[in-house]
Amino acid sequence: MSIATLSETPPQPSPKTTRRTGRLFALTGAVVGVIYGYDTGSISGALVFLSKDFHLTEAEKGLVNSILVFGSIVGALIGGKLADALGRKAAMLIVAGSYAVFVALSALAPNVVVLDIVRFLLGIAIGISIVAAPLYVAESTPARIRGASVAAYQVATVAGIVITYFVNWGLSGGGHWRWMLGLSAIPAALVVIPLLRLPDTPRWYVLKGRTERAVEVMAMTDPDVDPHAEVAAVGAALTEERGGSARALLRKPYARATFFVVGLGFFCQITGINAVTYYSPQIFEEMGFTGNGQNFLLPSFVQLASLAATVLAILIIDRLGRRVVLLCGIGTMVVMLAVLTAVFGMGDLHGATTWVGFGAILLFTAAFNFGFGSLIWVYASEAFPAQLRSTGASVMLTADLVANLLIAQFFPSLMAWAGAARTFAGLGVLALAALVFASATAPETKGRQLEEIQDYWRNGGHWPATPTPGSVSAGPLGNSAAPPTTSP
């Protein structure tokens, strides 16, 4: 049989093989998501004990966290090019291998200098995973379950943060910070095994001109579509996406959309979510809770509430609308930060007041995941045409990570210098600014096709009275999933 014949009639895998391959793609993506979440949150407990072992100042504590975020910025900047050049699968292998190596090395660090170097390298791996893992999941799953698969990756990431807090609590009795940091090396090493067995994504094969292999993999991963037609559609979409540049984001008609997306990305982190993720044991101690049992176990319940809020948002976002969910989430954050300011302003905390503070932290974190956490990537993917979508998402991610870097570095020093009440009051002002910003700029895009949404931005931030020709449909690939976020 000739190669030409093979390209016209690819071998059809059995339904059992297709289901197994699909599950393997989803499983590897979910495991990487869990590891990412775990590595993001594991320092929260470890920092309490390693600070004593290494005699860290408040600024040095901040650096242990911020150096990871700085590495994430570097990784995110190179992640897209790496995934395009080497492949989504190769990028995932690099991420999994790097996780395993650098997590293990961080657990063995003899001093804070070595720890900071290793965490910077781990941060690069995290930054690559922020870009590559959602791409890998979105491009390797059938269209009918693509949204659910990417949402599952977001849930897996939050689940990883939940797990790290329970692990921290379990190991806090002996102060085993090295185990807290190092345990995720095991699943990171194990996930390499299924990754080696899987192909790359059809979209990457098309990107590299390997259309025959793309057709084979498309038939393997999505038996409900005509693989030839779908690969042709992917090729057409890639042609449409070429030509986007960061400079175009600053010119009309996209400057307004860029302002919205970058502002949303910055406010997402500067309002303080990762202050809770990185420093929750210290916050609870300041609140009046005593003992490792409470200060390590209570954050676990906070993250469980966040997981529930993420799932709830996924279930209702297409019913209530994006704008309603986003504004409700940010509004609740503002109220909870006001409550925390009042709680910490009371001075010596005890009794019911401490539990009011705990409830405020829990609702603040859940509200973030309900609003910002669930919607930021949705808006980033909807605001720009195909040729600018990845560039716009990268710019938004950079703004997000820069704000994260500021919180990670300066929050502990600010708590020590200004006190908890003033620190949370400052975050409350920033959250109120975020609410005003989102209220003034966020469109309601529920049920709108991508071209209609782009008409909104072209029309100066207003819905046009009549749809622009060609706005009826975005096409079968118009709603391709974008990377989710947690609190990177």
Image (cartoon, helix red, strand yellow):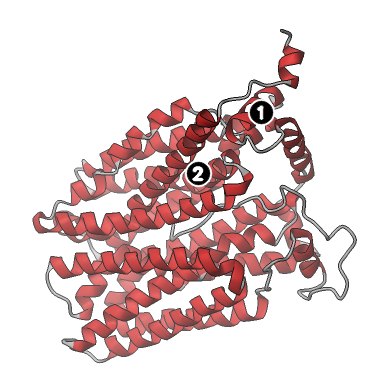
Disc 2: which residue:
133
155 to the left or right of 162:
right
* Crowd tier of the residue under label 1, counting other residues whose Cα lies within 10 Å: few below 14, some 14–19, many 20 or above: many
Q: Secondary structure at mark 2?
A: helix
- Whether residue 200 is visible: yes
279 to the left or right of 383:
left
Furthest residue to the front?
Answer: 15
Name the kind of residue labelled 2 in the image.
Ala
What residue is drawn where x is 42% and y is 48%? 33
- Whether residue 418 is visible: no
Disc 1: which residue:
214
Residue 93 place in picture, x, y as percent: 45, 32
Q: Secondary structure at mark 1?
A: helix
Nearer to the camera, 398 or 434: 434
* First in sequence: mark 1 vs mark 2: 2
Which mark lies nearer to you, 1 or 2? Answer: 1
Nearer to the camera, 235 or 40: 235
Residue 56 place in picture, x, y as percent: 21, 60
407 to the left or right of 358:
right
Nearer to the camera, 107 or 191: 191
91 to the left or right of 357:
right
Name the kind of residue labelled 1 in the image.
Ala
What residue is drawn where x is 22% and y is 54%? 167
Q: Which quadrant is home to the C terminus?
A: bottom left
* Cα distance in 3D space between marks 1 and 2: 19 Å
**Residue 438 in the image: above or below residue 179:** below
> Quick check: marks 1 and 2 in contact, CB under 8 Å?
no
Nearer to the camera, 407 or 145: 145
* Crowd tier of the residue under label 2, counting other residues whose Cα lies within 10 Å: few below 14, some 14–19, many 20 or above: many
What residue is drawn where x is 39% and y is 83%? 336
